[in-house]
Image (tube, grey):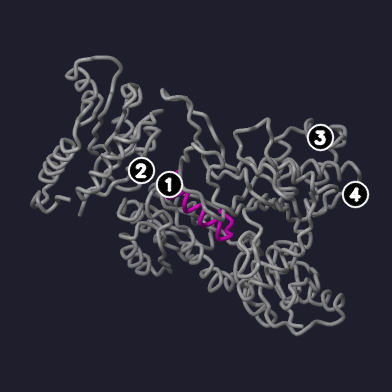
Amino acid sequence: MSHTIVTGVIGADTHIVGNRILSMALEDAGYRVVSLGALTPAADFIRAAIETAADAILVSSLYGQGELDCRGFRDLCIEAGLDDILLYVGGNLVVGKQPWDAVERRFLDMGFDRAFPPGTRVEAALSALAADFAARDAAAGVTSAASRLP
Amino acid sequence: MSAALLIDFGSTWTKLRAVDVDTGALIGTSQGPSTVATDINIGLDAALATLARAMHGLPSFVVRLASSSAAGGLRMVTVGLVRELTAEAARQAALGAGAKLVGEFAYRLTAADVARVDALAPDIVLLCGGTDGGNRDVILHNADALARCSVQCPVVVAGNREATDAIQTLLSGAGRTAIATANVLPALDALDIEPARAAIRDVFMQRIVHAKGIDRAGAAVDRVLMPTPAAVLDGARLLAEGVAGREGLGSLVVVDPGGATTDVHSIGAGEPSTPGVIRYGLPEPYAKRTVEGDLGMRHNATAIVAAVGLDVLAGRAGITTADARTALARIEADVEAVPSTDAETRLDDALVRAAVDIAMGRHAGTVETVYTAQGPVQMQRGKDLSNVQWLIGTGGAIVHARDPGSVLRIVCADPATPAQLRPRAPRLAIDADYLLYAAGLLAQVDPGAAFDCARNHLRIVD
């Protein structure tokens, strides 16, 4: 059974190209992708994840307002019963030149499982997903991680 | 000449239309009371007797088809998962099937919800939830909850296909009738309500008609095909699309202000009419029906007054507020009343204008400007009806209005509210002979005659 992943660009952000490339790469890797596209409110990620029983939400933000848009995202998930859903965020998450370590820390504190800096290649996201799903499946007592690979 | 008889068993009236299927001409109309509470044949026989007098004897009908909104209409309860997603898709499917929605539920049904379903006593439950391959826990939970209801009505199952087999086993095991059909929302960007609509109509035809005693008219009627609102929607669709050899009217909107509700039907894709606009939200049904349960010319006149304000309404009607209050009191005292004074006629006119105006505002999509770092972006929710080619009024309140054209113009786009995507410059017409339902029924056996009948009897009012 393959995993289902919700993708989209959060907030009033129209930068769709990178997100589309990511969504295509995820599909090629065998995932079921629910692509919400640009200008997606946080609540729509949650609604889509509930209805499609998604295993992960990948949030893109390219216009520097990600920190505002993503505030409380994990809390929304918990409120909707998606306590353990895997949450990634990536892109130009903040305005100006800030050290990545500090930016990453801030988003991890917000409840994201991973944050990715600008210029991340899709391969990095794919291998992170594979590792995280494998770890979760092992923890959940699924016999072999390999059998759950997409 | 071969003639078809088209019957509408309504909540108040049994209406008959006789159509010459060779020419599509309307050859007779009549009505009798609705007597489904006692014996549906009493009202039907009365209507047939009137028709026979008007036509100097009844022709031998080659086909006799009926729709029904009698005995409370097709009362439905819908159940979905996320309110804005599968619960909304379920709503669209039920309304498109001509149902009267009496209850809508989302997420997991609770014990209190089950009790409410029992209290509502629906004719059919539409059970949805989960995209295909998506969530299956909630629809299974809800099937289990419905199996515990004491109401024994059939359940149409149109959710995550991976859960369908288990649900059928579960419901059948509980002695319930479960009819499985395709998911109303197989993916978030794909609305697929036609299979559910067809399944609901089948259940209506095979079970509900009997349960409501409508099939007692069996000797005089070949088939009771669908709920009347579904027949009107089919008639509208036929007019828009045309049939082989007869060009349709193109995209259109039908407004139908009734005694208890105001219905709006739109046929068309509703794609953005201006380039660069981004569509947002669930995909929209090509043939869409909305029902405003709070906007009725008689049973809900008070609600219209509450929405608009009695002073404003009286001002529009050109009567004093005191006269408007008196006229409103008469409507409230007797919902069957027809206007007898000038003030009552004027108030009725103002009421119908307010009803169609508000109903269209809710049916039409909206466009909103969102300011982004890259500049303003236009986002559209719902259907863009700006370029709709025809706007058709049906129902007595419009057809008998002093100036039906001006009532329909209220429905059109208003520069003062540019966010509402209403028809900009449609042709205006009225279904003066109340033939849309008849065309929807006749289309099942003779689409050409049905189209000619509906098209040729439209009265242009622009």
Q: Which residue is mark 1?
A: B85
Q: Which residue is mark 4?
A: B340
Relative to A94, residue B156 above or below: below
The location of residue B458, given as percent across then percent down, is 76, 60
User: How many C-alpha atoms fall within 10 Å of the one at disc 2: few (<14), some, or many (≥20)?
Assistant: many
Q: Which mark is residue B316?
A: 3
Q: Which mark is residue B311?
A: none
Q: CA distance from mark 3 to mark 1?
A: 39 Å
- Specify which label sits upstream in the sequence, 1 or 4: 1
Q: CA distance from mark 3 to mark 4?
A: 19 Å
Residue shown at 58%/74% (left/top)?
B210
| Quarter residue A64 falls in | top left
Q: Which residue is mark 2?
A: A48
Q: Residue furthest bottom?
A: B60
**Residue B260 visible to an observer of this rendering:** no
Establish whether labels 3 and 4 are both on one chain. Answer: yes
Establish whether labels 1 and 2 are both on one chain. Answer: no
The location of residue A46, given as percent across then percent down, is 34, 38
User: How many C-alpha atoms fall within 10 Å of the one at disc 4: few (<14), some, or many (≥20)?
Assistant: few
Q: Amino acid at mark 3?
A: Arg
Left or right, B145 with respect to B420, comes to: left
Q: Amino acid at mark 2?
A: Ala
Q: CA distance from mark 4 to mark 2?
A: 55 Å
- Specify which label sits upstream in the sequence, 3 or 4: 3
Q: Are circles 1 and 2 on residues that touch, CB within 8 Å?
A: yes
Marker count (numbered): 4
Q: Chain of mark 3?
A: B
Left or right, B289 with respect to A99, comes to: right
Q: Chain of mark 2?
A: A
Q: Circle 2 — which element?
A: helix
